[in-house]
Image (tube, rainbow, N blue to C red):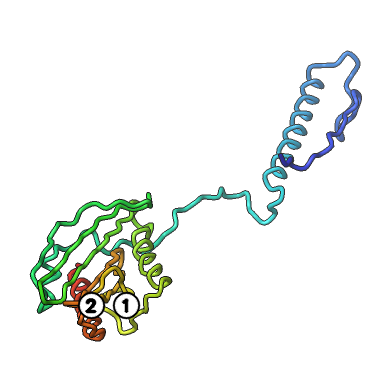
Amino acid sequence: MQQGPQYPYQQYQHHQQYPGYPPPKPGGGKTALIVVLVVAGVLVLAGAGVGAFFLLTSGDDKRSTAAPTTSASPAGEPDKYTSLPRCPEVASRMQGLPPLMRDDPPKPATTSDDELTMTQLSCSWMKSGSSSGQVTMYLSKSNVPGSGAGTRYAAAGYNNAVKDGAKPITAGIGKATKAADTDPHGSSSLQCGVQFYQGNVDVIVIVQAADEQDRNVDRCRRNAHKLAESASQSLS
């Protein structure tokens, strides 16, 4: 344990005289005794005060002791959204989508981050002989308003996708803060994806070609961008 600076204590003799005061009279009077006690008390208090000051400021000469230090919660970007749309609202902003096959309402999602609460929306459109589409949204709400936890979490999803090889879309996608093209795997048919975040919402879009013989990457990308724009515009 580190100790504060040590200071020698001055040894006072029994008959020490203090400046300005005569030596005590033989036998001692009450007045002289009171004066000595008062002066000794002042010196003790003064010594304690000086010792306390140096102990508090030891090793930190630049910090002022006039005002106590206070800790403030880190500020961040406020949550932009408080709810997610329904799947028909996403579909209403894009023409030519196949029938809606999944229309579950937004539901709570699990997260290991105790600074936020997450909600998830999943939508899918599918028809035999036609390209299919899927949209997954994650709404991250900060548990402490103004902490910025929601937006940081949403941005982390996009940043991780870029680290894994996703290519940023410089032209932008709808109202998305940032968006990138992804190349999903797991199907023999051609798949194209877009991942973006918009405020405190992280969105994953996947479009799959109609069949295994369809290898038109440009068309797949255009469809993925259109569906991503529809998802972006549906957020309000």
Question: Which secondary structure, mark 2?
Answer: helix
Q: Would you place residue 170 above or below residue 231 in this image?
A: below
Please rate how many residues cluster around mark 1, counting C-alpha atoms within 10 Å: few if below 14, some from 14 to 19, many from 20.
many
Question: Which secondary structure, mark 1?
Answer: strand
Q: Mark 2 to mark 1: distance in Å?
A: 9 Å
Q: Which residue occupies the foreground of this view, 167 or 219?
A: 219
Mark sitting on residue 93: none
Q: Quadrant of residue 146?
A: bottom left
The residue carrying mark 1 is 181
Q: Which residue occupies the foreground of this view, 116 or 146?
A: 116
Give the residue displayed 36% in from the left and 65% down from the top: 157
Outermost residue on the top side: it is 27
- For the residues labelled 2 and 1, say whether their Cβ atoms are less than 8 Å apart: yes
Q: Which residue occupies the foreground of this view, 148 or 63?
A: 148
Give the residue displayed 75% in from the left and 27% down from the top: 38
Mark sitting on residue 224: 2
Rendering coords of residue 147 (x, y %): 38, 57
Identified by mark 2, the residue type is Ala
Q: Quadrant of residue 100?
A: bottom left
Q: Which residue occupies the foreground of this view, 35 or 178?
A: 178
Rendering coords of residue 107 (x, y %): 20, 53
Q: Quadrant of residue 184?
A: bottom left
